[in-house]
Amino acid sequence: MATHISHVTKRDGQTVPFDSSKIKDAIKRAIVATEPKPKMDPEREAERFTGEVVTELGKRCIPGEAPHIEKIQDVLLDMLHADIARGSESYSSIPESLWMSYMLYREGHTMVRNGYLKQEHFRRNTKPVHKLKELKEWNAKHRCDTMYALNDWFSDTHVDLLINESEARSTAQLLEMAADLGKGIKEGRIKAVIVTGPSSSGKTTTCRKALRSLTASDPILKVKALEVDNYFKSHDHHEKLVYNVDGKQITDINFELPKSYDIALINEHLESIMKGETVQVPHYNFSTGKRDGEPKPFRLEPGEILLIDSLHALSPQLTEAIPMENKFRLYLEPLSVLSDNYGNPVFLTDIRLLRRMIRDVHSRGYPTEATLWHWHLVRKGERFIIPYLHSADYILDSGLPYELPILKHFLEKSISDLLPMFERNPDLYDGRERARRVMRMFSQLKEATVEQIALVPRDSILREFIGGSEFFDFVQKTDQK
């Protein structure tokens, strides 16, 4: 492949001849690992991507430049992500999965090299396979493993049985986790509970239900939460993207990266907190994008356990002031093994996207379209979260097998109304493809009724998003049609 680039710079600083076959080999390995049913021959698919990477790299490099290997990988990722824009004409059969798979694998290697992730915790497959296997068996037993089967439940007057069984399964997992945590606390090992998971996994409800369970079994136990989001840096420190939307410039701010936090101040405060000292926690105003108001004093009383609930809490840098042996690390994510009527699996990320769309409207004031066009940044930020999955002390499935017909009730019309806007604006291609995929899924699903939604228990994880939770003040309307 013709290019003016003759050499590249390796991580150790050595300069070596440029060889495009290495790019092709990396892409081909990712395709073989990711795509069970490739759209085209992996060799041909990798060849096409390589050509685009080499061409784009040539545009980004000045004559004589020997690009660093990281720059080459950045371009490769950009080309994989751009393939999503082709829609049905994309080279890949599952372009988003290929993009994410390469990104997660790359970041996992970086974490191992930098000593943040142990080699034994590194996996090419970043999904909790054992949890997915358990869920598959549970769904088959309860006749809710396909959309046909799920629709049967929501056509039946006894859908409350599925809802109650799903909630019982969720609670059983939580009680098992709480028992492990409680044991560590009683032995005096655990001083801090670290809770993490991708966006909209239900971390807040899980924390509150777990704490209720722990304190019920041990009334003396006290847990105090440190609100890490108050340590966000001001807006002017965050990455910003600009989209052209119907002729207007829309600015999107990326809060999804670890560097969005003032990590140095977090650890300074954690070190003091662990010594029993009082710290002054800042207040972050999401409306202004800055810290304002009076800081609030925070101190752990003797015997109290610290709770940290944050997207990037498993990252060692975020809580390095707390010894590893004193942490209990919980990772949660809503899982699904549901297949559509054509045998295609539901994307796990779509469940979280739908949850967040609903929540963002009523609790953060973000319109549905903003959540949708921002979601690719959420996914990029997850490269700093998901590779730590297998380093957690406990992995919890926070999904509910019955939730999709309920999410359809809240979102089908609004996404349908927004789709033309996403279709006519090329900058929003990522959101466009997600909206198309969600609408295809909704078209195969029966919609939950208001009466069926009322059957969801008030302590359910789902209530964190649709409203009516006993742990939150808001009440989401169920008559958005």
Image (tube, rainbow, N blue to C red):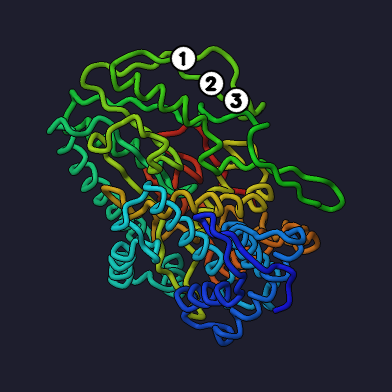
Where disc 3 sits, the SS reads: strand
Q: Which residue is found at the position 41% from the left and 23% from the top?
A: 268
Give above or below for 119 relative to 328: below
Q: Nearer the viewer, residue 204 or 293?
A: 293
* Left-right relation of 24 to 272: right
Dividing the picture into quadrants, the one containing residue 399 is bottom left
Q: Position of residue 152 (x, y in %)?
A: 43, 71
Residue contact at pointers 1 and 2, CB within 8 angstroms: yes
Residue at mark 1: 296
Residue at mark 2: 283
Q: Upstream in the sequence, badge 1 or badge 3?
A: 3
Q: Which residue is found at the position 40% from the left and 36% from the top?
A: 309
Q: How many numbered marks have been drawn onto this rendered protein structure?
A: 3
Residue at mark 3: 285
Label drawn at residue 424: none
Kind of residue sitting beneath label 2: His
Q: Nearer the viewer, residue 266 or 330?
A: 266
Q: Position of residue 401 (x, y in %)?
A: 39, 61
Q: Upstream in the sequence, badge 1 or badge 2?
A: 2
Crowdedness near tag 1: few (<14), some (14–19) or many (≥20) residues, C-alpha within 10 Å: few
In three-dimensional space, the C-alpha distance between marks 3 and 2, rounded to whole angstroms, equals 6 Å
Give above or below for 123 relative to 50: above
Give above or below for 28 relative to 236: below
Where disc 2 sits, the SS reads: loop
Q: Position of residue 275 (x, y in %)?
A: 28, 18
* Left-right relation of 216 to 3: left
Crowdedness near tag 3: few (<14), some (14–19) or many (≥20) residues, C-alpha within 10 Å: some
Which image quarter is the N terminus in? bottom right
Kind of residue sitting beneath label 3: Asn
